[in-house]
Every structure is written in C-alpha cells, then in structure tokens.
Image: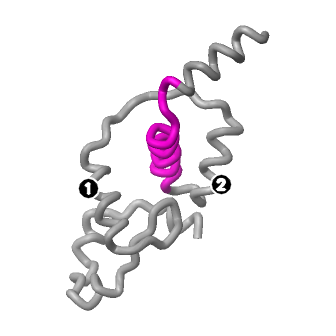
Amino acid sequence: MARVDAHEISDQEYDELPELTHADIERGVWKIAGKEVTPAEGNASFRLALKKQKINITLDPDVLGWYRAQAGGRGYQTLINATLREAMTTQKIEDALRRVIREELHR
C-alpha cells in the first residue's frame, strides 16, 4: 500500500479516470486523522481547514512520532490542531500561567 500511496498520478492518468457519479460521492466516508467521522464533522473540519494558516513549528521527535502513529501517518497535523484547540478551550490561560510559574519557582 505504501507504494501505491507514493505513486504520483500524472495528468494523463487523471484524464483517464472515470468521472465520479452522485452515487459514488454518496458512498464516500469522511475521515479525520484516519478515523471515520459523521458528514457534519467532516464538513466542519473542511470549513476550518480553509481558514488555517501555515506555520513552521519545531517539535520533539517522540511527540511528532506519537501524533503520526495516532493518525496513521496522514492527518497528524489535523490531530495536533485538534489537541491544541481542546487545550485552548478547556483550560483557561490564567490557570496555565499559574501552573507554569509554580513549576518554575520550584526548580
């Protein structure tokens, strides 16, 4: 399967592909980070993806490896974004700052 995923489809190969029918599209399944989700979740994720900004970030190799493994190789950036969003919405910034300050004071 890795070989199939690594193959880049040429313009000619695209031209030879049959057109998708409405029935083909209806049979499609939304997946985020390799996990099947509802059409509503898939559409919401797609809309969010259109608004995302590209950045460069340096992560520890084990952290990146863990996210890639969790996502099955593809969709790991979406998984990292979801984790950051969850942390952002569930933990108030004041609580995070207090915790960091306490940890730094006890070093």
> Is 1 in the magenta?
no
Q: CA distance from mark 2 to mark 1?
A: 25 Å
Residue 54 x, y percent position in the rendering: 35, 35
Amino acid type, callout 1: Arg
Query: Is 104 drawn above or below residue 77 in the view shown?
Result: above
Query: Is 54 drawn above or below residue 29 in the view shown?
Result: above
Q: Which residue is mark 2?
A: 69
Q: Which mark is residue 86?
A: none
Residue 22 x, y percent position in the rendering: 21, 87
Image quadrant occupied by the C terminus = top right
Colouring method of the image = one colour
Front residue of 63/8: it is 63
Residue 8 x, y percent position in the rendering: 41, 60
Label 1 secondary element: helix
| First of labels 2, 1 by sequence position | 1
Total tally of numbered discs in the picture: 2
Label 2 secondary element: helix
Q: Which residue is mark 1?
A: 47
Query: Is 4 drawn above or below residue 107 in the view shown?
Result: below
- Answer few, some or many: residues within 10 Å of disc 1's Cα (few below 14, many 20 plus, some between 14 and 19): few
> Is 89 in the magenta?
yes
Amino acid type, callout 2: Ala
- Region of the chain picked out in magenta, as a range: 75-94
